[in-house]
Image (cartoon, grey):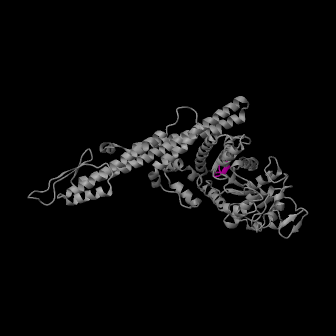
Amino acid sequence: MDMATLRALRPSEFEEAADGYRAMSSTASAAKDTVENQIRAGIRNQLEGETAAAAMCELSKLGQNFHYAQTECALISTALNAFAFDMAAAKRKLETAVADAEAAGCTVGADGSVTYPAGGREVDGKVPEGGTVAVGLSPKDSGASALDRQAAHLHPNPNFGKAVGFADRIGDALKEAADADAKWAPKLRALKADDDLVVSARDWSDTKSDQDGVGDAGKRYLDSLPQPPKNGGPKDNAAWWKDLTPEQRAAWLSLRPDSVGSLDGLPSAVRDEANRVVLDETLARYRLELASIPKPPWNDLDELRDWNAKYGERRHHLKASIKGMEAIHRRFDATGGVGGLPEAYLLGFSPADDGRAIIANGNPDTADHQAVFVPGTTSNLSGIGGNVDRMVNLWQVAHSKSGGQSVSTITWLGYDAPDEVARDARHDSYAYDGAPAFNRFLDGLEVSHSGDTPPHRTVIGHSYGSTVIGAAAQKGTLNADDVVFAGSPGVLVSGADEMDVPEGHVWNEEADRDWVPELGGPFLGGDWGITPSAHTFGAHQMTTDTYGHGKYWEPCSGSLLNQALVVVGKGDDVELKPWPDKTFNPPGYWVK
């Protein structure tokens, strides 16, 4: 890049273009929300039949198109801002070097050369003449730089050395601009979408590549922005986000959506926006990778053994993860369904290992009542759909009993749940490892809530999930008003008074034929405390009309109704059961 071009360049014009793309991203986001949460919901509630089903399918694709446009436009905006940042830095260096040269009595030519005046002590009766130093556009090694310094020192005109320095600075600025131009040109060209009307898995997969490319090229720009607090709490995270400009927020969302989506304390809408990008990119990449794996050679045992060693574990992970991600999308698509189901918010997502997912029905930041559900043993991304359905059922009943107040029910799979009952659920390490993350999440809900009155918050633990809640109460501050246990094997504390909630706000459900509360404690071993079903624990024992370990959230059941009443703060209306005719066993378990 020559000096005239760089001096004429206006980084602000690229920043203005970036603002335009950011506005386009916001427009696409609003269009996506309208399609998914209003138009689709209206069709679902008013129409049925093949035509309606076909329309819903096409609208789903349209919503995805808008989401893709939102993501790509935001990325283009950030790329343009990063390019402007690099060019502005080079231009500042150039202008400073030119100004310094002119202040020293030198003249800078249109090509960047520096003409210096006569000066120095007379030689043979003459003052050493001035001259011109050409601009250098190539980097110099240490040897060449040393020779330049030596020549400048030996030259009879001291202005020569100054001119060499100015010319080098000008050359460095021009080279920096040329390098930035060469670096960004292919990155910006790569952001051009395919010339068709279909957003394919390949398109979404390329979005991740685009993110990585712009992120690498824009590292200096991103490093210049305020950084997220290291090991910060929800309040620190919220303060960081609040102080960012719209441009800076867009940069973090477009380049580091996985980081933004994981920060407790940020607004739920922001976390949802970030995590949906990660979800769609991951789903696309996983589908493409799964399709690329050759089919198992079922007819050849040796080849099948080799195939399984090479592809088996990865294929299982891909299929399980895709199943979970598709279930999350089905929940997105269900907005506006039975009972006026509210918009879903994806507050956390990761496909790593067994996977993580946090899904809210309704915006927790504006809800009067929040319920956070922690699932138990064998919970993973693959089976997230069933746990989401449980909280959908709870939302519908709680909403109907809330007296017009808003409710948000949240599935929190934010920990590594035990994979197997016999092998893994015997250990309390899973609970203690997950407890800090659970406490941070609850604190984050408190920080991000935007209402004038703090929400009423209930935490609900099923099976080993109740153990996680107990560990959270034992090792930290449980930011909750009520606790509900269902099918609990033990919660690591000896009584309800240790659950860090007001007295009388610990509730328990034990259904008939649920073997976990009966056998869980002795089977688990160790210092698990008595189960919440024990009389001496001190929990309110709610009636149940469901059977077995996993049906506490069955629609139209009393088990579900009692939980919903607690969630909306109507504990006085909960139906409690009398203590059964059992004999108390000293370790703390009721034995029939």
Q: Residue at x 44, y 41 (%)?
A: 186
Viewer-side residue, 326 vs 360: 326
- Look at the picture and state if 397 lies above or below 493: above
Q: Position of residue 25 (x, y in %)?
A: 53, 41
Q: Residue at x 47, y 40 (%)?
A: 20
Q: Quadrant of the N terminus?
A: top left
Q: Specify the quadrant of the image occupied by residue 230.
A: bottom right
Q: Residue at x 65, y 62 (%)?
A: 436
Q: Position of residue 112 (x, y in %)?
A: 27, 47
Viewer-side residue, 119 vs 99: 119
Tell me where the magenta segment starts and ends, as one range: 357-366
Q: Furthest residue to the left?
A: 125
Q: Position of residue 476 (x, y in %)?
A: 66, 65
Q: Specify the quadrant of the image occupied by residue 471.
A: bottom right
Q: Furthest residue to the bottom?
A: 586
Q: Furthest residue to the right?
A: 581
Q: Position of residue 91 (x, y in %)?
A: 34, 49
